[in-house]
Image (cartoon, grey):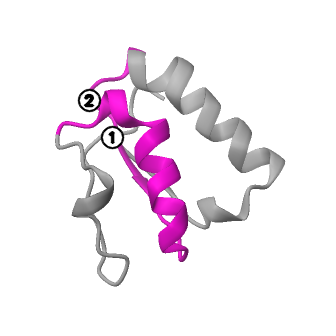
Amino acid sequence: LSNITHLIIDEVHENTLECVLLLVLLKKIIIPKRKDLKVILMSASSSFLQKLIHYFYEYTDNPHNNSDINPHIPHIIHI
């Protein structure tokens, strides 16, 4: 993974076993070792956005709280 600069994961709201495993690996192993890696998580579900923010909160450089989020516009959260 050392040559990879960006990782894009779509449909993270589907909660498949593979997606959940990938999110856990990202949080526990990959992101702590690769601070320069840009991770883009995409979901069509605005309600899932809150779960992602909560799960990756410690890695965000612009953390949001629940009142900041409008579910009708895209959100950029730097991880």
Amino acid type for the residue under numbered disc 2 = Asp
Q: Residue at x 30, y 39 (%)?
A: 79
Tags 2 and 1 touching, CB below 8 Å: yes
Specify start and end residues of the magenta stretch as a single range.
33-61
Percent across and percent down for residue 64 are 24, 49
In space, the residues marked 2 and 1 are separated at their CA atoms by 7 Å
Instruction: Tell me the residue that label 2 is attached to.
Output: 36
- Residue 49 painted magenta: yes
Percent across and percent down for residue 51 are 52, 50
Neighbourhood count class around disc 2 (C-alpha, 10 Å): few under 14, some 14–19, many 20 upward: few
Quarter of the image for residue 13 reads: bottom right
Instruction: Tell me the residue that label 1 is attached to.
Output: 5
Q: Residue at x 36, y 35 (%)?
A: 57
Q: Earlier in the sequence, mark 2 or mark 1?
A: 1
Quarter of the image for residue 70 reads: bottom left
Q: Residue furthest bottom?
A: 72
- Residue 11 painted magenta: no
Q: Nearer the viewer, residue 23 or 55?
A: 55
